[in-house]
């Protein structure tokens, strides 16, 4: 498993507290970039721009990845384009919602 895969797997521990589904299966993680220096840049969104748990979720993502000993600096970029939609969810996420 390469570092990017390890990061994505670790991010499955970060839950959206309202839906109780992890950020990966919800489709909130758009990109994970790992530099040669092991710095990590995560591009993600939230289900809605006005999400009251914005800080909690993005901090959880940062903290989770910083906890991996192979990573150095972690940057989380929150984007609204493209907008999140249920089509971005994994099959596992959809099952958790009962679809």
Image (cartoon, rainbow, N blue to C red):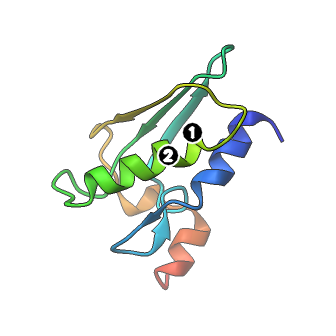
| Residue 90, x across and y down, in percent | 57, 62
Alpha-carbon neighbours of circle 1 within 10 Å: few (<14), some, or many (≥20)? some
Q: Position of residue 69 (x, y in %)?
A: 71, 37
Q: Quadrant of the N terminus?
A: top right
Residue furthest to the top: 36
The residue to which callout 1 is attached is 66
Q: Position of residue 30 (x, y in %)?
A: 48, 41
Judging depth in this view, the residue of 93 and 56 nearest the camera is 56
Residue 69, placed above or below residue 21:
above
Tag shown at residue 76? none
**How many C-alpha atoms fall within 10 Å of the one at disc 2: few (<14), some, or many (≥20)?**
some
Image spot of residue 94 (x, y percent): 51, 73
Q: Quadrant of residue 2?
A: top right
Residue visible at 65% across and 31% down in the picture: 71
Q: Helix, strand or loop at disc 1?
A: helix
* Residue ID at (19%, 60%): 52
Residue, far right: 1
Disc 2 secondary structure class: helix
Q: Is residue 71 above or below residue 1?
A: above
Residue projecting furthest to the left: 50
The residue lying at 28 percent from left, 50 percent from top is 55
Left or right side of 55 for 13 = right
Q: Where is mark 2, residue-wise? A: 63
Above or below: residue 80 compared with residue 90: above
User: 36 or 98: which is nearer to us?
Assistant: 36
Closer to the camera in the image, 85 or 73: 73
Q: Quadrant of residue 24?
A: bottom right
Asked whether disc 2 touches disc 1, contact meaning CB atoms under 8 Å apart, the reply is: yes
Q: Is residue 22 left or right of residue 57?
A: right
């Amino acid at each position: 498993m390469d570092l990017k895969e390890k990061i994505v797997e670790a991010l499955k521990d970060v839950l959206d507290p309202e839906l109780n589904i992890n950020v990966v299966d919800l489709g909130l993680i758009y990109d994970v970039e790992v530099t040669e220096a092991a710095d990590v840049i995560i591009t993600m969104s939230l289900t809605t721009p006005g999400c009251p748990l914005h800080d909690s979720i993005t901090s959880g993502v940062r903290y989770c990845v910083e906890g991996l000993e192979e990573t150095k600096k972690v940057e989380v970029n929150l984007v609204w384009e493209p907008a999140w939609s249920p089509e971005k969810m994994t099959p596992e996420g959809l099952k958790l919602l009962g679809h």
